[in-house]
């Protein structure tokens, strides 16, 4: 069901904190817009059925303080740990984590893979801008090999994670990767993720012209969006072969789309066996 666009900002955003603190040309606004479009397409009049959790970083600011909703702005790397407790205590709430790649995949890396392995009922939107943006442009687990950052001034010697493949292999029910240059596809993927039971993960490749663009000489927001627009899209049901992401070879699309039993299903089964 489509909901009218009237009073969009008043229903979904805290107007008192607008405009946002994001740099001009940042991709975070596009992600917020795509997320709220998905929520509206699902027929929600507001965000009262959701509980949002974020960690530390620019991506974490998308929901907190901007969304007019219950939000937990937690410690660095621990968003999924907080979200797990929240979901178990309030199983009727739709729990959504929105945070960055440094927060979710480095400091919070173990929480991410184990939440996917458990197939916990929650949606995670990972804003991947290939760097620790807010804390000073340090190298992260998704930074491309050779990139110059504040902590790798002569080039990054490490290989980056392919987050969508990692989370798929760990056992999530739904995994998709899009970019801020694909807002329609991104919003559709978020919509699917929000209605899918179990662990759903949408990785959004997003331009950070300030911390990543300047340090790696990747250009301004327009140049970065042109780069993202050219990334290859996977064929439906193509095999998930392992490959190290490069600037030109991060494939987009759906990586996992299944309905395996969730953590809540398994837990309820055990509890009902004990009660019998
Ligand atoms: S530092 Fe990068 S990610 Fe953070 S607000 Fe600025 S452009 Fe966006």
Image (spheres, helix red, strand yellow):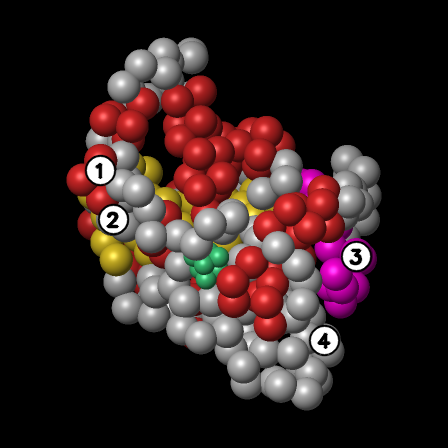
Q: Quadrant of residue 16?
A: top left
**Residue to which mark 2 is pinned:** 65
Q: Quadrant of the C terminus?
A: top left
Among the two numbered marks 3 and 1 on one chain, the one whose residue lies closer to the N terminus: 1
Among the two numbered marks 3 and 2 on one chain, the one whose residue lies closer to the N terminus: 2
- Residue 248 bears which disc, if any? 3
**Rounded to the nearest whole Å, what is the CA distance between mark 4 and mark 2?**
34 Å
| Between marks 4 and 1 in the image, the one whose residue lies nearer the viewer | 1
**Rounded to the nearest whole Å, what is the CA distance between mark 2 and mark 1?**
7 Å
Q: x, y percentage for residue 146?
A: 73, 78
Q: x, y percentage for residue 241?
A: 80, 57
Q: Are marks 3 and 1 in contact (CB under 8 Å)?
A: no
Among the two numbered marks 2 and 1 on one chain, the one whose residue lies closer to the N terminus: 1
Q: Which residues are magenta?
A: 241-255
Which residue: 62% across, 86% down? Answer: 153
Q: Is residue 47 above or below residue 99?
A: above
**Residue to which mark 1 is pinned:** 14
Among the two numbered marks 4 and 2 on one chain, the one whose residue lies closer to the N terminus: 2
Q: Is residue 145 above or below residue 193?
A: below
């Amino acid at each position: 069901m489509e909901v009218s666009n009237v009073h969009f900002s008043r229903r979904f955003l805290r107007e008192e904190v607008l405009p946002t603190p994001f740099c001009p040309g940042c991709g975070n606004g596009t992600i917020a817009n795509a997320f709220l479009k998905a929520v509206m397409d699902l027929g929600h009049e507001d965000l009262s059925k959701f509980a949002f959790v974020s960690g530390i970083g620019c991506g974490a600011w998308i929901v907190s303080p901007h969304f007019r909703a219950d939000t937990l702005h937690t410690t660095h790397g621990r968003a999924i740990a907080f979200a797990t407790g929240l979901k178990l205590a309030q199983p009727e709430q739709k729990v959504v984590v929105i945070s960055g790649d440094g927060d979710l995949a480095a400091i919070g890396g173990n929480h991410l893979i184990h939440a996917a392995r458990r197939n916990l009922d929650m949606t995670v939107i990972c804003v991947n801008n290939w760097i620790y943006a807010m804390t000073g442009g340090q190298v992260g687990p998704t930074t491309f090999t050779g990139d110059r950052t504040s902590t790798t001034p002569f080039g990054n010697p490490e290989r980056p994670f392919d987050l969508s493949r990692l989370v798929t292999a760990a056992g999530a029910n739904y995994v998709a990767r899009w970019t801020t240059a694909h807002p329609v596809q991104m919003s559709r993927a978020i919509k699917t993720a929000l209605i899918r039971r179990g662990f759903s993960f949408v990785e959004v490749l997003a331009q950070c012209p300030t911390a990543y663009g300047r340090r790696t000489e990747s250009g301004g927001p327009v140049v970065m969006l042109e780069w993202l627009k050219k990334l290859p899209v996977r064929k439906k049901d193509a095999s998930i072969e392992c490959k190290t992401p490069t600037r030109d070879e991060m494939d987009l699309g759906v990586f996992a789309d299944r309905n395996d039993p969730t953590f809540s299903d398994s837990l309820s089964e055990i509890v009902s066996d004990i009660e019998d």
